[in-house]
Image (cartoon, rainbow, N blue to C red):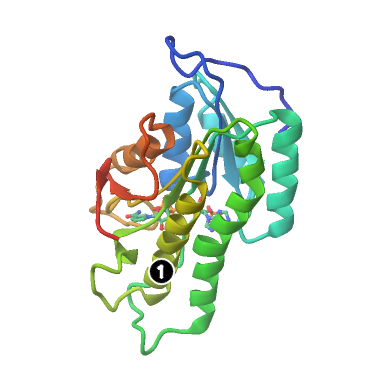
Amino acid sequence: MSRPARRVPVTATAPIYRVALVTGANRGLGFEVARQLGERGMTVLLGARDMDKGLHAARKLAGSPGEVIAVQLDVTQQDQVDTLARSIELTYGRLDVLVNNAGGYYDPRANPVNADIAPARGAMDTHLFGTWRLCSAMLPLMRRHGYGRIVNVSSGCGATATSGASCPAYRVSKAALNSYTRALATELDGSGIQVNAVCPGWVATDMGGPGGRPVAAGAAGIVWAACVTEHVTGGFYRDGQRIAW
Ligand code: NAP
């Protein structure tokens, strides 16, 4: 993260400089969210646990109206989270948008009887604790300006309103993420920092596989929550519509 920020207004009518961080953004939904936020003129920090992949992805977005910059970030590594928070503070002095997108551990062939603990731990460390680490580290940068949009990329699979036995590691970790989202939103209500969970729907990424909808469509609902101007917090959304927890 060596280059200085190019300060581009978000819109012509509201010239507000915004800095966004998207985790797991070297491919899939995270990459597309980074692209769409860059199209809106934001400075976008494209998180990647493999920096070579991050740099390759950021190069593809070089013509963006905003600026897209690769940053090293494995969300399970507290030292990387802390280093990045310090670097953002020194370089920009602010963070306006945090999209907790990094994910994996989709285990459709497992069930709660045969599931191993190891992938469940990995899912929790990435989806729940990864998000938790990022929020704790970045909130001071949001509080400083009394503005923030935190989007936790979840899944309908994590809705406790639905039942299902497949994908136990994935399902339980996304349900925990939803619970964390509600608690954090409650704590931050009135602070200017809005926190929501978003399900992108079934999307044709490496994780989603063929048959899902286009990545741009899934990412649009995440970008909506990242840019929402109304008071919208503590909810679970798909395509900008509230869904049941
Ligand atoms: P994807 O194409 O498999 O991409 C996952 C991204 O997360 C990759 O960039 C991966 O990095 C990164 N990642 C994984 N673990 C990480 C870690 N510990 N630290 C940093 N980055 C990490 O998946 P996707 O479909 O875009 O999924 C993105 C999010 O949407 C996930 O949270 C997923 O649960 C959610 N979601 C997806 C669907 C769907 O149908 N696709 C549906 C509901 C929810 P590497 O390249 O290094 O592996």
Of residues 158 and 46, which is closer to you in this image? 158
**Residue at position x 25%, y 58% in the image:** 244
Q: Residue furthest front?
A: 190
Where 64 sits versus 169, above or below?
A: above
Q: Quadrant of the N terminus?
A: top right
Of residues 36 and 195, which is closer to you in this image? 195
Residue located beneath label 1 in the image: 170
Q: Which picture quadrant has residue 125?
A: bottom right
Q: Residues within 10 Å of mark 1 (few under 14, many from 20)?
A: many
Where 22 sits versus 209, above or below?
A: above
Residue 52: percent from the left, percent from the top?
A: 64, 44
Of residues 143 and 67, which is closer to you in this image? 143
Say whether residue 49 is visible. no
Indicate the amino acid at tag 1. Answer: Tyr
**Residue at position x 51%, y 52% in the image:** 187
Where 71 sits versus 129, above or below?
A: above
Say whether residue 164 is visible. yes
